[in-house]
Image (spheres, rainbow, N blue to C red):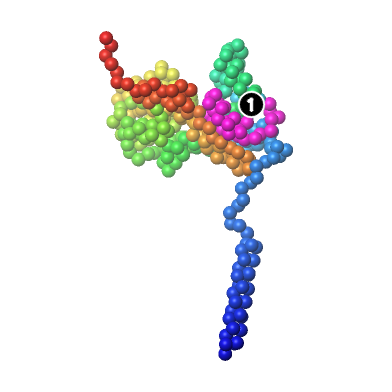
Amino acid sequence: MRQSRVSLSSHRIAFLLAVLSAVAAVGQAAPSTQAAPSPAPTAAEAPTASQAIARIVQATGATLPPNTVDTIKAGDPATPVTGIATTFSPTMEVLRKAVTAGDNLIVTHEPTFYNHLDDPAMFLNDPVYQEKLAYIREHHLVLWRFHDTWHLRRPDGIAEGFVAQSGWKAYQNPGPAGEQGFFFTLPETTLQFLALDLKRRFHARAIRIVGDPSMKVTKVAYAPGASGEAKHVKALERDDVQVLVIGEAPEWETILYARDAQLQGRKKALIILGHTLSEEAGMNTCAKWLGPLFPGMKIDFIPAGEPYWTPESVPTRTETGHAPVKKTSPRASR
């Protein structure tokens, strides 16, 4: 009897070992459900700046317009790309962060050298221009402007980013032909609370509003950056637009028009986010969109940040290069 029990026990042990061996074999043979990350391209495999730019433009599906500003502003087009940084504006702080991150292709929405065409004629002997250019050359950076074709992409890449950050995706309505993505029907609120919500969502220090703070609003349009008076006024003339959110405008153009509309008793208002805040989210969207185009490539969004501050909202040392002044109570002059 004892011998049969030992034999039976041996059979059970052998059976269990066989089952465990089979399970291990199945586990080894089963494919992983989690895709392995794409390896970073080697120096030999990395695209040059010009090759990367061509790939980006092609992916937008847009055609470069005549006299486009989407050109390389500084750097060697043949430079192998080690990493890509997207930004609204390539400030010195953005460039320093890109160098630290190992990104040498800077994809910027706005100019590098202080005017729309990046024409350096008036800055050739200017110390600010010279220091910036020297930094770019020292670190072998390539700066390329991605403005026209990013707006021409459908949906407009800048508008897509704004909609995501504002939280208005569910409230989009068709709008005029060719301008889908710029008109919204929001839950009813007041102009004041709409402005406060945008200030919170875009982490703004300073935005400006024209209109009656208590005006009830639901119909809103968005015109990014410096879209121009013609586009602004055309939007405000529409019956389905009560509030226009813009980047910037001269105070004697759209802003004066909106003030007069309000003073005439019309239900019209303007929220001025500032050019940077009205478009910067679109370059965050750009960084995410570039990922599948460059598998394994390091891609970073580096915000330029709001350039303005107010006495109530003082910027940090990182944003200005100087320690902020400590808040003190105002004292009567003697």
Q: Amino acid at mark 1?
A: His
Q: Which residue was labeled with disc 1? A: 139
From the viewer's side, name the closer residue of 234 and 286. 286
Rendered location of residue 78, percent (x, y): 71, 29
Q: Position of residue 142 (x, y in %)?
A: 64, 27
- Residue nearest the viewer, comparing 201 with 83: 83
98 in magenta: yes
Q: Which residues are magenta?
A: 76-104
Camera-nearest residue between 209 and 154? 209
Judging depth in this view, the residue of 255 and 40 nearest the camera is: 40
The quarter of the picture where residue 197 lies is top left
Which residue is at the far top?
334
In the rendered view, would you say 295 is above or below 199?
Answer: below
Relative to 3, residue 203 above or below:
above
Q: Is residue 160 left or right of residue 293?
A: left
Q: Residue at x 29, y 20 (%)?
A: 329
Dot 1, crowdedness within 10 Å: few (<14), some or many (≥20)? some
The answer to which quarter of the image holds residue 217 is top left
